[in-house]
Structures are given as structure tokens and as C-alpha cells.
Image (cartoon, rainbow, N blue to C red):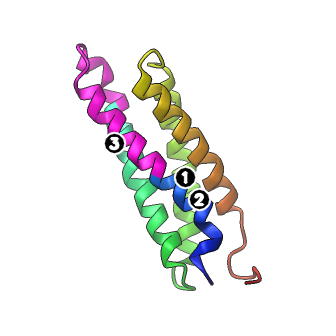
């Protein structure tokens, strides 16, 4: 099994992780940072999960194939939550960009999670 078949999802996860970290850091610099607490918290969780999902897909061994699908399913769910939270603050460019990256990643992860990795042809 080769990780190249997951390149689109890995890239989406990496881009989402970076967008979430950037957004969380930018939120810390907002005037009313207390209003951004949920956005910061979920953004950091989302970034961590995106990175872990990308790592499991990159490993792409029989030992990790089930975990990769499970991580991607959870990642999709958390990305949707993060996007919803960021959309509450869409007047801020960093939140708007993060929401888009999260929606894109959620879609890629949903698709990957539904893929049968074991029985795919090389």
C-alpha cells in the first residue's frame, strides 16, 4: 500500500492544521480575546488531529490502515465543528480562511474514511 493514493487528503490535513494554528494565534491577538476562547481551543484540537491523521495516512501500512480511517472520520467531525465556530467570526480574515480549510479537510477526510484501503488495487 502506498501513501501517494492519500496525497489529496494528507495535503488537506496539513493545510488545515496550519490554518488552524494561524487562526488560533491570530485570535489570541484580538482585542476581545475572551470571546475567541472556543475558537482557539477547537482550532488547536483540530490542528492536532489533522496532523495525526496525516501521519497515519503517510505510514500506510496494514497495521495502521484501520487507524487512519478512524482518525480521518474523527478529523472530519472536528473539522466541521471548527469550521462552524470560525464562521461565527467570519468578519476576521483568519477565521474565514480557517473555516474554508476546515470544510475542505472535512470533505477529504470523509472521502478517505469511506475508502476501503485493504482491498484497493495498487
Magenta span has 116?
no
Q: Is residue 97 left or right of residue 112?
A: left
Q: Name the residue rendered at 63%, 84% in the picture.
A: 1
Q: Name the residue rendered at 24%, 20% in the picture.
A: 33
| Label 2 element class | helix
**Residue 52, quarter of the rendered image:** bottom left
Name the residue carrying label 2.
Answer: 9
Q: Is residue 119 left or right of residue 41?
A: right
Q: Which residues are magenta?
A: 15-39
Give coordinates of residue 85: x percent, y percent: 46, 28
Q: CA distance from mark 2 to mark 1?
A: 5 Å
**Residue 113, quarter of the rendered image:** bottom right
Image quadrant in which the C terminus is located: bottom right
> Are discs 2 and 1 less than 8 Å apart at CB?
yes
Question: How crowded is the residue under tag 2: few (<14 C-alpha within 10 Å), some, or many (20+)?
Answer: many
Give coordinates of residue 30: x percent, y percent: 26, 19
Name the residue carrying label 3.
Answer: 21
Q: Earlier in the sequence, mark 1 or mark 3?
A: 1
Magenta span has 21?
yes
Q: Earlier in the sequence, mark 2 or mark 3?
A: 2
Q: Name the residue rendered at 56%, 46% in the picture.
A: 77
Image disc number at residue 12: 1
Give coordinates of residue 95: x percent, y percent: 43, 27
Q: Name the foreground residue: 43 vs 14.
A: 14
> Are discs 1 and 3 less than 8 Å apart at CB?
no
Question: How crowded is the residue under tag 1: few (<14 C-alpha within 10 Å), some, or many (20+)?
Answer: many
Helix, strand or loop: magenta stretch: helix
Amino acid at each position: 500500500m502506498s501513501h501517494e493514493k492519500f496525497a489529496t487528503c494528507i495535503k488537506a490535513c496539513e493545510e488545515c492544521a496550519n490554518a488552524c494554528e494561524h487562526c488560533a494565534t491570530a485570535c489570541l491577538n484580538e482585542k476581545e480575546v475572551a470571546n475567541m476562547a472556543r475558537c482557539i481551543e477547537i482550532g488547536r484540537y483540530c490542528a492536532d488531529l489533522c496532523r495525526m491523521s496525516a501521519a497515519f495516512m503517510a505510514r500506510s501500512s496494514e497495521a495502521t490502515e484501520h487507524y487512519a480511517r478512524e482518525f480521518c472520520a474523527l478529523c472530519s467531525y472536528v473539522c466541521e465543528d471548527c469550521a462552524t465556530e470560525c464562521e461565527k467570526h467570519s468578519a476576521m480574515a483568519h477565521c474565514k480562511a480557517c473555516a474554508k480549510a476546515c470544510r475542505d479537510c472535512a470533505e477529504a477526510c470523509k472521502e478517505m474514511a469511506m475508502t476501503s484501503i485493504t482491498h484497493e488495487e495498487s
